[in-house]
Structure formats: C-alpha cells, structure tokens
Amino acid sequence: MGIPQPAFYIFKCEQSAPPGMPKPSCVTPETQDLFQYTAQKLMKEGIMMTAPIVRTSCMNRCAQGPIMLVEPGHTMYVGLNKEKIDRIITEHIIGGNVVEEYVIDSEMWDTAISPADAKKQMGM
Ligand code: FES
C-alpha cells in the first residue's frame, strides 16, 4: 500500500500588513495565533496527515480576513476566529459538509475563469 494523499489541503493566509498600513490583512496581533490554533486542533483530532494546513501569502480577499481556502472544493472561509475554525474542522473537514454561513459572499468569489479564457481576455 502506498502513502495516501491528503483528503484536503487547508490554505491559511498568513499575510500581515506592515504597522501603520491602512490596508487590512489576515494576520494582526489579535489574529496571529489562528494558524497555530488550527494546526493544534488538526493534530488533536489526529487528522493532520490527511488534512494538512499550509501557510500562504495574500489571496486578494484581505478585507474579509482572516481567511482560509479549503481544497478540493474551492471553499473560501472568511472572518475567521477560533469558534469558526472548530466548526469548519468538525463539520466540513471531518463531517464533509461545508459550513455555508462562514463562506465568502458569492459576489466576492464568482465562478473561476479558465486559464485558456484568461489568455483570450488578455488578447494572448
Ligand atoms: S492578506 Fe490575507 S487575503 Fe490578503
């Protein structure tokens, strides 16, 4: 038997704006422990191997931060805190049901443009 691939990847934006920058960001002094919190929760549940969390930089949804993207499924969770992360892990990652109330507004997360169509739009 081979090494199983993960069932999910959890991409957590870990971008912080420099002090004094007006632009919002996902990591502030109040939210900087969310990555660690999520990693510990996944370890406690014994599912880190099949649902690893990955640090990323900005995914261009800063105003809704803190955010994380769950793949597969393109599920973008926004406005995160510890309680929301607990529910996402229990209900989505373990239970298989997206926690719709924490998902980004569809206006802000419209259907993806295929790379082939993106090239056409750019006249390439
Ligand atoms: S800083 Fe997290 S999406 Fe931009």
Image (tube, rainbow, N blue to C red):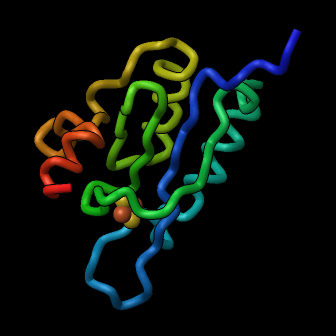
Question: Observer-nearest residue: 118 or 36?
Answer: 118
Image height of 74 relative to 3, above or below: below
Image location of residue 42, percent across then percent down: 68, 33
Image height of 118 relative to 47, above or below: below
Image height of 29 relative to 58, above or below: below
Image location of residue 90, percent across then percent down: 54, 21
- Residue drawn 57% across the image and 34% down it: 9
Question: Observer-nearest residue: 5 or 90?
Answer: 5
Which quarter is ligand 1 in?
Answer: bottom left
- Quadrant (top left, top right, bottom left, bottom right) of the C terminus: bottom left
Image location of residue 25, percent across then percent down: 37, 68
Q: Quadrant of residue 112?
A: top left
User: Furthest-right residue in view?
Assistant: 1
The reply to whether residue 35 is visible in this rendering is yes
Image height of 19 relative to 37, above or below: below
Question: Observer-nearest residue: 47 or 1?
Answer: 1
- Quadrant (top left, top right, bottom left, bottom right) of the N terminus: top right
Image location of residue 41, percent across then percent down: 67, 36
- Residue drawn 62% across the image and 42% down it: 53
User: Furthest-top residue in view?
Assistant: 1
The reply to whether residue 45 is visible in this rendering is no
User: Furthest-front residue in view?
Assistant: 124
User: Furthest-bottom residue in view?
Assistant: 20
Left or right: 7, with 124 as reference point: right
Q: Give the number of callouts.
A: 0
Question: Observer-nearest residue: 54 or 33?
Answer: 54
Left or right: 98, with 118 as reference point: right
- Residue drawn 21% across the image and 47% down it: 118
- Residue drawn 27% across the image and 55% down it: 64
